[in-house]
Every structure is written in C-alpha cells, then in structure tokens.
C-alpha cells in the first residue's frame, strides 16, 4: 500500500505532457527572422522579424537590432506598415529600409540606436530596389517613375486598359543625395531613361562615380533572356553596354579596384532554365568576358568581391554554403556552411572579416548567426527556436532511394514524436514547387500544409527532392526535360514504395499534396496513379497548353518541353494531367488563387470539371484577390484547415 501511495503522489506531481504540435493558429502566429545585415564595424546586426497581425490580416515585419556578441537585441521600428530590407550606410551612421507608411513604397532612414524614422524618398511610383553609395553620400534606387502625360490623357479619354506585349512601363535608375539630417528634403535625379531597356539589379562602383546594372529590353518576364550588363557614369549619364551574350546576364558586382565587373551569365545557353548559371568577369570599360565557374556543378549565387576573391552562395544537396572564388584561376573553396549549418542568406562587414547569416541546423528553426570568416565559429544571436519549447515536434532526417530509371532521389522524412520502428504509419507526401525548389530538414511554421499536425496524428511525411530539384547539379536538374510529370511521378511513387518495403508506411493510407509545380505533380498523380487515397492540388497545372497560353512566363514551358504546343502537341499531351482524366479515381482537393498569373485559374477549373465529369469526388476552393501564393494569415488558416480536414477524412476515415 505504501508503494502505491508513493506512485500516485509522483503521478500527481509529474508535469503535464507537452502538446506535440502547435495548432494552426499557433503555427501561423510564429515569428520568422530574415534579411540579416551586419554593421560595417561588425558590432551590430540589423534584421527583420515577421509577426502576424490578425486584426489587419497581414504578416508584418519590423526591424530589430542585435549586438554581434548576442548580449542585447531590441525592436527598432514600429507601426502599422512593415519595414523591410535593412541596409547600413557604409559609415555606419544610418540604417535605410523600405516601407509603405505613406501608401507607396519608399526608402526611410533611422539612427541605429533609435529615434524617429523619416522618409528619404518621395517617389510617385514607389521605390523598387535601392543601394547606398560606398561614400555614404547618396542612395541609388529603381523606379517606374511618374505616370506620363500621354498615359494620363489616354485614361481620361478611354478609361484604363492595357495592350499585351506592347504597353510597358520601364524601370530606371535614380540617385538621391542623403541630407545630413531629417530636416532637409532632396530631390532624386533620374540617371537612365528611355524605352530601350528596363533596369533590374545594380551596384555602385567603389569610387561612387559609376553604377553597373543589368537590364532587359522590356519588363515582360518572358524577355528575361535579353538581360545584358551596362554601366552608367553619373557625371554625364553616359550609358555603355559592356556585356551582350545570348541568354541572361545579370547581377553585376565590381572588383575592389573598380577595374572589373563580375556577373551571372547563362553563358550563351539557349535552354538555360535547368542549366547551371556561371560567374564571369569583364573589364569595366568593356571587352572580352572570361567565364570562371565552368567546373562548379551548381547555381552560384554571386554576392560580393573582396580583396580575397569573389564570394558566392550555392546549394549543396539539402544544405547550402558560402564559397570564395579565385578570379585568376577559377577555383573555388567552401568557407562557411554546407556541413552542420545551411546558409540561407547574409552579409559581410566592410573589411570582410565577419559575417551575419540566416542559417539553420538540421531539426532546428532558422536563426541569425554571426561568425568570423578566417576561422568560422557561427554563434546564434537570436532564439526563435524557443517558440517550439512547449511542443514536441516531429523529427526530420534525409533519406534516399532509387527511382524507376535508376536515378538516386533524396528526400526529407518527417517522423512523428515517439516513432516506433516496425510499425506501419499512414504516409503523406508533400511535394515542393519549382521544379528547382528544394526541401530541407529544418523546422519552419506550417503555412500551407499542417505537417506538424499530420505528424501528431501519427503520420509519416515524405518531402521528396524529385528530379529537377536544385542542389544536386545540372544533370539532375535536367532529368525532367521533356519528361515533366512522368519522371516526377516515378520519383514520388518509388519513394512511397521504398517506405512500404522498409515496413514503415501503410500502403492503404497514402496521400499526396503540393503547391505550384508540386500541385502539378499532384494533379499528374490524380490522373496517372492508383497508389493514393487522397490528393491535394495547390495552384497546379492541369494542361500545359492551357498553361502556356495564359501564364506570365511562357519561356518556362518552351524550355522544359523544348517546343511550343503548335510544334509538338504530343509532348504537351504526354506531360499534361488532363490527358488521362478518364483514368482518375482519387478524391482531389483543388486550391487556387483567383488572380494567379503564374499558373492561371483555368487550370483549376479544367481539372475540377474533368474530375467531376469522370465521377471522381473533387472540391475546388478559389481564394479571391490572391495570385500564385495565398499570402494572408486568415486565408492561410483556411488552406491549412481544409487540407487537414481533407486528409483526416480520406486517410484516417474521420469526419
């Protein structure tokens, strides 16, 4: 009896078990860090923290400051509108950022240690991107500029309309002198003009007298192949094209002495969507470019050029790293990340001796880290992982298997807390978009599919990096060329078969879902596979011809299928889910934004009506006012709840 009393007393004193997963509202309310920018002297890091404003139905970001040693952090900006893109002036006196506090997006300034922020620009059209001059005296920015008198007169006479392919507004460079204090208002000077090009990315020269920029012939996304590299001299506004090769050339970066410019290039590739881009350099005065990264088998994301060499970031399977490229030899070496830390973005101090990065470790939430460069030792200066302290979330691990054609496929397997080997679990496949997206073993708030809640219900979740995914080299990204849908289905089905063969998955309880390209693959599974009990198609393609004639990126289809529908209707039919609609048998949830230009809404109606006519249960939800992504918390709440209800019904048999 005494032992029983002691046992009961201990049970009463034991803490209540932590909930395994956040609710949908808790997940949507989690804060997310981003855009780390380290001060020139390395003492402070500015970054954004996104929070959920349920009253305004928005995700809002504000600027925060943290000491580089992690001893202090505090919120710097407040207000009803977001503050984004923090950028230190090179002298460390100001922090610039963008906000829409006065309706249009403008550049504002604030003193790093606090005080009132004040607007630097008052551009009629609003500011695109911006950058400080190295001498801290000016800021350059892009803008569409004021509406022309001709356009205003046309609206007055005819009302508003647009002429597709022949009615563009061109973006140009502007430069503004930064006043000494907030009491002075300066007017921006337009540096480039005309309708021969529209400005994209740009960088100041080290001596603050020139700007290098990339530009396309017009702002149509289909004209991306026409991007070339230019320079403009501020004193006389003289523009010179210095790179003009087939395919896009973009993202110019000056050498420290201002004599050369590095840039990203397709290196003349006609079909470049799935190919590696390269880093090349060219004399700043013009001349013959020299391509450097021919032996680097991934997409190098060009960042900076220091005395030590050219810096770039790149994916490395499910990780990511920072590399240093020797411009004299073309050789590169990994400096930071790619092992236990995956780099998502960051910045350097003025002397390139330290960096602040947004990064994650496996099974952890992304944090802001600071590290010296010579002997990397990253330390987190934020603690966003604390948001998970009250939960027992699922575990993530990277697995691999062979697809039908022998291709090795990796994926992230998410196991519920308390996973028991030898037990068969329901299996849900969550398919990323892209196709050059990638899934990685990090924790993040659920914003489309309730992964943690699925795991808490006792499901395994597989996130496959199917062929075409980034991080695995050019040959792997090319495996779904003229094989879209078909090869992707092989990769998903073989992953399911592998987990069934391992005794982990219940073959009678398998579902799949995905958004964008993941939605397309889910739609392809709906009409070509019988392995699934339920499917969810988010903003997915149902018919490549329907997609091709409606989308805002026509080259995508032409490049991956290497034909137009008029040239090769057979390849469009082979890779379109709608072709085999009469084979469909799987209950399918379809979710789509009303104003989606990337994957236009007719794709959703086509699949929905085809399933209905075939006698397959289907549900179509159209989110009014949204484009390709559902970006507001209340509507995301519905996306999550609808998917939870759909798979709870069809996989677990619960209503």
Image: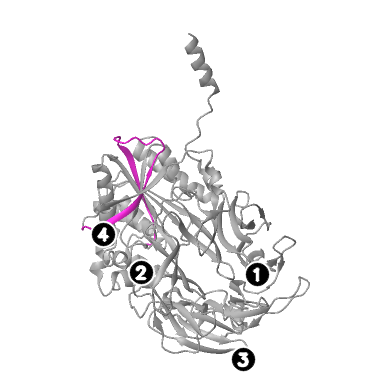
Extreme residue in the right direction: 183
Which is more toward the observer, 572 or 288? 288
Label 4 or label 3, whichever comes before in sequence order: 3
Q: Nearer the viewer, residue 568 or 17?
A: 17
Q: Indicate which label's residue lies in the foreground, 1 or 2.
A: 1
Q: Earlier in the sequence, mark 2 or mark 4?
A: 4
Image: magenta residue range? 405-434
Inter-mark Cα distance, 4 to 3: 55 Å
Q: Which residue is mark 2?
A: 548
Query: How packed is label 4: few (under 14 Cα within 10 Å), some, or many (20 or more)?
Result: many
Query: 10 Å neighbourhood of mark 2: few (<14), some, or many (≥20)?
Result: many
Rendered location of residue 494, percent (x, y): 25, 51
**Label whose residue precedes the other's in the sequence (3 or 2):** 3
Tag 3 secondary structure: loop
Q: Is residue 579 above or below residue 312?
A: above
Per the image, the residue denoted by label 3 is 236
Residue 351: % across, % down? 58, 71
Q: Which quadrant of the figure contains the C terminus?
A: top left
Badge 1 is on which residue?
107
Name the side, left or right, on which 89 lies relative to 245.
right
**Chosen colour scheme:** one colour
Residue located 48% across and 54% down the image = 360
Q: Residue 77 at what x, y percent from top left?
A: 68, 58
Q: Are marks 3 and 2 in contact (CB under 8 Å)?
A: no
- Identify the residue position indicated by label 4 in the image: 487
Is residue 335 found left or right of 523 in the rendered image?
right
């Amino acid at each position: 009896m005494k032992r029983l009393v002691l046992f009961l007393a201990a049970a009463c004193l034991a803490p209540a078990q932590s909930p395994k997963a956040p609710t949908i509202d808790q997940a949507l309310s989690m804060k997310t860090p981003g855009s780390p920018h380290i001060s020139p002297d390395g003492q402070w890091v500015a970054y954004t923290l996104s929070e959920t404003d349920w009253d305004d139905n928005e995700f809002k970001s504000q600027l925060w400051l943290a000491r580089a040693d992690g001893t202090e952090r505090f919120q710097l900006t407040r207000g009803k509108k977001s503050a984004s893109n923090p950028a230190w002036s090179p002298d460390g006196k100001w922090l610039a950022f963008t906000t829409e506090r006065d309706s249009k997006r403008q550049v504002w300034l604030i003193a790093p240690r606090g005080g009132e922020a004040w607007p630097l620009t008052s551009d009629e059209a609003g500011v695109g991107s911006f950058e400080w001059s190295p001498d801290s005296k000016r800021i350059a920015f892009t803008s569409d500029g004021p509406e022309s008198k001709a356009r205003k007169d046309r609206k007055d006479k005819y009302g508003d309309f647009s002429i597709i392919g022949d009615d563009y507004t061109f973006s140009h460079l502007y430069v503004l002198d930064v006043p000494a204090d907030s009491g002075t208002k300066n007017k921006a000077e337009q540096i480039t003009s005309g309708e021969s090009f529209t400005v994209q990315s740009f960088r100041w020269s080290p001596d603050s007298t020139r700007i290098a920029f990339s530009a396309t012939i017009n702002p149509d996304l289909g004209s991306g192949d026409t991007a070339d590299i230019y320079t403009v001299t501020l004193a006389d506004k003289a523009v010179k094209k210095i790179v003009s090769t087939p395919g896009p050339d973009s993202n110019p970066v000056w050498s420290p002495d201002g004599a050369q410019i590095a840039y990203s290039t397709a290196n003349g590739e006609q079909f470049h969507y799935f190919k590696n881009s390269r880093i090349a350099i060219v004399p700043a005065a013009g001349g013959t470019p020299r391509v450097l990264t021919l032996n680097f088998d991934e997409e190098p994301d060009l960042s900076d050029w220091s005395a030590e060499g050219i810096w770039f970031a790149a994916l490395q399977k499910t990780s990511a790293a920072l590399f240093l490229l020797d411009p004299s030899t073309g050789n590169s070496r990994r400096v930071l990340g790619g092992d236990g830390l995956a780099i998502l973005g960051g910045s350097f101090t003025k002397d390139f001796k330290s960096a602040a990065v947004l990064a994650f470790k496996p099974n952890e939430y992304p944090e802001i880290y600071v590290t010296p460069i010579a002997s990397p030792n990253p330390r987190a200066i934020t603690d966003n992982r604390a948001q998970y302290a009250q939960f027992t979330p699922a575990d993530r691990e990277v697995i691999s298997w062979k697809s039908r054609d022998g291709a090795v496929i990796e994926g992230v397997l998410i196991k519920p807390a308390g996973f028991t080997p030898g037990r068969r679990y329901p299996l849900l496949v969550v398919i990323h978009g892209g196709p050059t997206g990638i899934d990685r073993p990090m924790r993040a708030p659920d914003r489309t599919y309730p992964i943690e809640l699925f795991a808490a219900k006792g499901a395994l979740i597989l996130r496959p990096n199917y062929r075409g995914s980034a991080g695995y080299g050019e040959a792997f990204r090319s495996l779904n060329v003229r094989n879209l849908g078909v090869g992707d289905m092989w990769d998903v089905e073989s992953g399911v078969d592998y987990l069934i063969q391992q005794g982990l998955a219940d073959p009678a309880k398998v579902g799949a879902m995905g958004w964008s390209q993941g939605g397309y693959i889910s739609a392809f599974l709906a009409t070509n596979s019988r392995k699934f009990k339920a499917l969810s198609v988010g903003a997915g393609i149902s018919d490549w011809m329907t997609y091709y004639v409606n989308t805002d990126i026509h080259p995508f289809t032409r490049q991956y299928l290497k034909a137009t529908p008029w040239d090769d209707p057979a390849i469009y039919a082979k890779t379109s889910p709608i072709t085999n609609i009469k084979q469909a048998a799987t209950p399918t949830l379809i979710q789509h934004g009303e104003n989606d230009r990337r994957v236009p809404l007719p794709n959703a109606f086509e699949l929905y009506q085809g399933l209905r006519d075939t006698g397959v249960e289907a549900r179509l939800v159209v989110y009014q006012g949204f484009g390709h992504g559902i970006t507001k918390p209340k509507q995301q709440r519905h996306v999550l709840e609808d998917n939870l209800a759909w798979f709870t019904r069809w996989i677990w048999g619960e209503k």
